[in-house]
Image: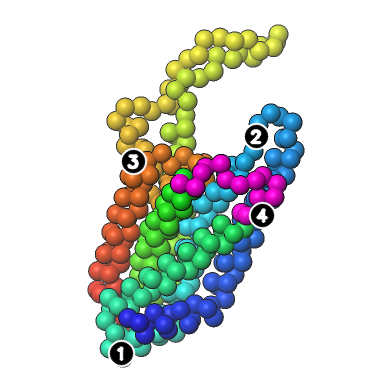
């Protein structure tokens, strides 16, 4: 395993896709934060106080995209170059090869996360530090690491399932978009207000009426099911993080651990059955 990890990390430091993803995420994070600083400056007289927290986690959903792009291309290159077959020929087990690939992809994901966090620091001079508090900030970072592990496990499974680099990349991107759209739809339904405003616009202007029940509001057991699904999906947790709404940290952490374990076991099983000839 040590030899496999050494070889994988040696290839990682030379991988152009890795460095491009790292630079792109750093630039996106800094750009997003600078845009937030500009928004705070424009609305300075509105009476609403802007803090670093309002913008710092905005790009959390993008982490899964970069994991999908990197894992699919990095692992696809191993197949196209015949590296996977060579590793098995010299005596490494399939489990060791798979786990070494998983660990290097997770290490890359953590570095992407570090670039994202570093880029957001450009907002400190204009917005000051975090208002979340040290404990809440540490909790958010821990949950980010856990849902990154889930994303990595999923896209490592996908990346090792295809011998074609192009096919693996396309499927990984489509899967990421599917997870993001699914989580967004669930989140939007949960964001529906229970009551609709009673404001009525007429020729004379706006008049206030009685609030009416919102037919799109979901409650009871269905709402609990939607909330659980959002927490279960790593894309759902990233959306909640972007909106500072991680309300069930223990459940969210356990969900990430479950998804990671399930994806790792599923990927190992599929890789053992895969015909590499």
Instruction: Look at the picture and state if 211 lies above or below 125.
Output: above
Instruction: Quote the CA–CA distance across marks 4 and 2.
Output: 18 Å
Q: Within 10 Å of the Cα at label 4, are there few (<14), some (14-19), or many (20+) other Cα atoms?
A: some
Q: Within 10 Å of the Cα at label 3, are there few (<14), some (14-19), or many (20+) other Cα atoms?
A: some
Instruction: Quote the CA–CA distance across marks 2 and 3.
Output: 32 Å
Q: Nearer the viewer, mark 2 or mark 1?
A: 2
Q: Which of marks 3 and 4 is in front?
A: 4
Label 4 secondary element = helix
Residue under label 3: 228
Residue 146 appears at what percent x and percent y? Answer: 39, 56
For residue 176, say whether it is visible. Answer: no
Q: Residue at x 71, y 8 (%)?
A: 204
Q: Earlier in the sequence, mark 1 or mark 4?
A: 1
Residue 122: numbered disc: 4
Q: Does the magenta stretch include residue 181?
A: no
Label 2 secondary element = loop
Instruction: Quote the CA–CA distance across marks 2 and 1.
Output: 62 Å
Q: Earlier in the sequence, mark 1 or mark 3?
A: 1
Residue under label 1: 89
Q: Within 10 Å of the Cα at label 2, are there few (<14), some (14-19), or many (20+) other Cα atoms?
A: few
Residue under label 2: 49
Instruction: Quote the CA–CA distance across marks 3 and 4.
Output: 35 Å
């Amino acid at each position: 395993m040590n030899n496999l990890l050494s070889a994988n990390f040696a290839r990682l430091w030379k991988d152009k896709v890795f460095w491009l993803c790292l630079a792109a995420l750093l630039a996106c994070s800094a750009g997003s934060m600078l845009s937030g600083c500009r928004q705070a400056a424009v609305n300075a007289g509105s009476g609403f106080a802007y803090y670093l927290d309002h913008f710092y986690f905005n790009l959390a959903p993008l982490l899964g995209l970069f994991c999908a792009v990197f894992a699919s291309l990095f692992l696809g290159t191993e197949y196209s170059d015949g590296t996977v077959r060579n590793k098995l020929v010299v005596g490494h087990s399939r489990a060791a090869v798979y786990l070494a690939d998983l660990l290097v992809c997770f290490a890359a994901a953590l570095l992407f996360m570090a670039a994202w966090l570093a880029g957001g620091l450009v907002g400190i001079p204009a917005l000051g530090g975090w208002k979340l508090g040290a404990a809440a900030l540490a909790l958010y970072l821990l949950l980010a690491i856990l849902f990154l592990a889930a994303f990595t496990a999923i896209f490592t499974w996908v990346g090792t399932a295809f011998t074609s680099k192009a096919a693996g990349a396309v499927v990984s991107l489509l899967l990421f978009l599917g997870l993001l759209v699914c989580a967004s739809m669930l989140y939007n339904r949960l964001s529906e207000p229970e009551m609709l405003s009673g404001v009525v616009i007429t020729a004379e202007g706006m008049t206030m009426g009685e609030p009416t029940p919102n037919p799109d509001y979901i409650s009871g057991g269905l709402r609990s099911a939607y909330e659980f699904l959002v927490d279960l999906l790593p894309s759902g947790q990233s959306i909640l993080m972007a909106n500072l709404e991680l309300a069930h940290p223990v459940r969210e952490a356990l969900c990430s651990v479950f998804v990671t374990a399930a994806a790792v076991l599923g990927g190992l099983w599929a890789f053992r059955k895969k015909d590499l000839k």
